[in-house]
Image: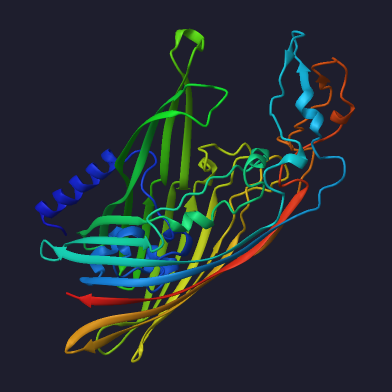
Amino acid sequence: MLPRPAARLVATSITCALGLAPGTAGASGALELAGAPTSANGLTARALARHAETAYFNPALLPRAAPLMEVGYFALHTQGTIDLDARPEGVDVPESVYDAHVIGDDGSAERLELRPLPTNRLPEPRRRTKVEETRGYALVGLVRPFFADNVSFGLFAILPLRGFLAQNGFFADEREQYFSNRLDYELLGDRAGISSFTVSLGGRVARWLAAGIGANLGFSTVTRFDVYVPDAADQSTILLDPEVKTATTLSPVGGLALYPSPDLTMTVTTHAPVGVETSGENLLRFWNYDYPDDQDHIRQAYVFSQGYVPLRVGFGAAFARGTRPEGNRRWEFGTSLVITQWSEYRDRHGERPADRWKDTLTPALGVAMMTDHGRFVVDLAYVPTPVPEQTGRSNYVDNSRALVSLGWEAPLTVLGSPLGIGLYVHGQWLVPRSVTKRPEVPYPVLDEFPDGATDFVTGGPIDEADGLQTNNPGYPGFSSRGYLLGGGFSVRLPR
């Protein structure tokens, strides 16, 4: 059991971490995509972690982690394709949309709810998406015990080598016609380019119980631009006064480890929502302009949410069998089940999907075998997609994923100093998926040129408005497939 000073330290750390953490903060980057990529049993780390990765995945396991400092490298290659179904005739938006308006309930003329561009004037042609990229990561970890080895401190960080943060915004409906006019993977791509820093404390509360708490460090940004436009007819000339504030944020990570017997470990973990959020506003001022409501400016507000991952609660178990002459266990088996609250998901524009996503259960299995030639491990996992069938207006592209990871770790002596090395490979298969838009859904594809639209000059009907006209890049359907392959190594220096 922890001595009283150590117990007070752990309790105080838990209280501070929970009190300082906002609803959404920090970042998890590739850790939620590929697990602990330079650690044994990286997909079942919530139950089988034994090095610095415990700081993020389950800080309650820190007391059993060997004191060390580690560095690693991992490369992840993503290959994905999104194919678009051919558009039927008659759905293009004609140029007569420029002359269109609708008559409101009170008989007054109103502009179109959405102002689509004529299909032949879109800035980019509708086309398939081909993703092929390779990202490299540096990983750094540290485990240090204190209070007579009853409490351990852990640090774990993953740093993309191409930049600290990659952020690409896009709309998942017809609004993307104004920009790239194509579809993108919602939960892949730039999300893998986010750095993650986690610091944690873990300690044994009793012989049969260990607890841990940590914080995933991130940041949030608030921007404000005062914009003066001297000539509204010439908006290439403007005056700007920017104000940018960036704050450090914390997102709690917690865990419990129960030891009913020397052979069995049972774990519970929780990870608060994480994401990189940028919010801001533009205050626009024009020369000789009458502002509404006695204001002296026009306010534009925006929110960008990057890499958002909602609340995750995990349950795990590990079972050890056999004992080697030096005291190590010969076999370890582990399993975990992670519940993710995807129903609270917010996309890159801070919007909740109208067709709410589904909460998911992610199972994983792992095994480790210790031999005279090192530790050999294999993990299997299945990540179901939370995205419902995109048969309506939205085009959130995501696939279920089948994962496998293999690893080997062994001790070495270099120039008289002990070292630990590890080699790892990782693979994911995106289960192919196809969707077809349907009209009889709660949120169907929007008719961007509504029936009954009239010509605002002549007042007569516009025949081209009859039927469905849309520039939604996902109409009438699309399919997606792909895979991820990775490999890396680690070097560990024991204390």
Along the viewing direction, whichever of 121 and 430 lies nearer the viewer: 121
Q: Position of residue 292 (x, y in %)?
A: 51, 10
Kindly indicate the quadrant of the structure image that contains residue 258: bottom left
Q: How is the image coloured?
A: rainbow
> Which residue is located at x 42 percent, y 58 percent?
315
Q: Is residue 38 visible?
A: no
Is residue 307 shown left or right of residue 83?
left
Q: Is residue 375 visible?
A: yes
Q: Position of residue 203 (x, y in %)?
A: 21, 59
Residue extending farthest bottom: 372
Residue extending farthest right: 463
Residue 327 lies, with reference to residue 169, above or below; the image says below
Q: Quadrant of the C terminus?
A: bottom left
Along the viewing direction, whichever of 381 and 355 lies nearer the viewer: 355
Residue 11 lies, with reference to residue 292, above or below; the image says below
Is residue 486 shown left or right of residue 203?
right
Residue 148 lies, with reference to residue 107, above or below; the image says below
Kindly indicate the quadrant of the structure image that contains residue 438: top right
> Which residue is located at x 38 percent, y 38 percent?
23
> Which residue is located at x 22 percent, y 72 percent?
68
Is residue 120 shown left or right of residue 29?
right
Count the marks: how many? 0
Q: Position of residue 6 (x, y in %)?
A: 13, 54
Residue 476 lies, with reference to residue 415, above or below; the image says above
Along the viewing direction, whichever of 244 and 107 lies nearer the viewer: 244
Q: Position of residue 462 (x, y in %)?
A: 87, 24
Q: Quadrant of the N terminus?
A: bottom left
Is residue 95 shown left or right of residue 243?
right
> Which residue is located at x 33 percent, y 92 percent?
372
Along the viewing direction, whichever of 352 and 153 lies nearer the viewer: 352
